[in-house]
Image: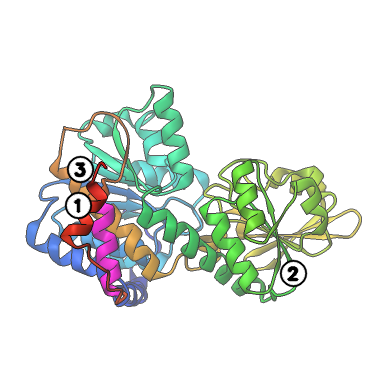
Amino acid sequence: MRIKDLTLAPSGRQKIDWVKSYTPVLNQIEQEFLKNKPFDGMKITMSIHLEAKTAYLAEILKAGGATVSITGCNPLSTQDDVAAALAEEGLEVNAVHGATAEEYEADLIAALSQSPDLIIDDGGDLISLLHTSCRAYGNNLIGGCEETTTGIHRLKAREAAGLLDYAMIDINDADCKHLFDNRYGTGQSVFDAIMHETNLIVAGKRVVVAGYGWCGKGVAMRAKGLGAIVYVTEIDPVKAIEAVMDGFQVLPMAEAAKVGDLFVTLTGCKDVITKDHLAVMKDGVLLANAGHFDVEINKGDLESLAVAIEQRKPCVTGYRTADGRWLNLLAEGRLVNLAGGMGHPAEIMDMSFALQAKCLAYLAKTKGTLTKGVYDVPREIDVEVAVLKAKALNATLDVLTEEQKAYLLATE
């Protein structure tokens, strides 16, 4: 066990209880798991942004009979009071906000040391360790789930190279995840964090969104709604056309760098913003990353350009250049919505974490039948979560008649 302070638990419990008031799908799954105990006798390891919504997921898995060990997936997204609340409830917790790189890896290893039957990974760090220094801890592993775009990229690269030894379910690409979590969750939480940490207006600013996947679409949509002038950078011609038809101008980063007031990177790739871009940016520019790893904005290049580095606000590091400009990096270039904010809204994570819970139960039930590889979320699980959420939102669906069903199935 490694947490900051157990006396912080009451604050963390308040946060978790607040989340539970706005997650009707997860609440229903918790009652189902309490009754059916799908994980009875099993051990589950989670590496995930350790905050109130993920804490509730961990408690639901425990309600299902699992022994749960949880750690973070980013050194700056752990909330110490939430970690304490989970520890007080008897979960094994190894996570402290602001962990060093060495402490962060040690916490991951500690979480895996129980030799889990199932895992939840967020970004691919658990899988990476299970294929390298922690192979012995994978002896009991049935499989797991991966939450993020970045983690799926890493998994599929490993699978293509013939280097993936386990069955992993791709949560990120399920309809009830990427259409809502990536778009509406990221769109709102990114600007929640940026506005809170900077206390600056978005309206009238030139916002550059790097990457027009589902997360980028959400950020661009929210920026437009807040009154920004939005530019998009892309490498994919189809996504570039989408951005144009959604009302945004598409520019290469070399050109966007000259006009942007606020940059948000969401590509999952490294070196999206580098020295050449930084050299032509405006004084006072805001640089934020919402991709999983802190590699999209090249921090080494920022440092090399700076004649002075100053903590200008708690979550804003200023880099002063020789010509007097301030380049402001938010949340150390880490996930701004979690390192500088509260993460996605509870109502959105209600769907994403319902998928996680249901897919782990599916893996437990089908133990040994899935060979190593990356699998889509079973369609029936995606639909089940959608039906439950639609009911919670008072959305009443039409139902096909028997004649309509026959018409849709007709071959002539």
Residue 314 at least partly seen:
no
Q: Is residue 186 above or below residue 168?
A: below
Q: Amino acid at mark 3?
A: Leu
Report which residue position mark 3 lands on: 363
Against 39, is 201 above or below?
below
In this view of the protein, can residue 378 be seen by the observer? yes
Amino acid type at mark 2 = Lys
Residue 160 sits in quarter = top left
Query: For numbered disc 1, what is the local secondary structure?
Result: helix
SS majority, magenta: helix
The kind of secondary structure element at disc 3 is: helix
Mark 2 = which residue?
Answer: 205
Per the image, the residue denoted by label 1 is 406
- In the rendered view, does 122 fall on the left or right side of 259? left
Q: Nearer the viewer, residue 51 or 104?
A: 51
Mark 2 and mark 3 lie on one chain; the one further toward the N terminus is 2
Q: How is the image coloured?
A: rainbow
Which label was assigned to residue 374?
none
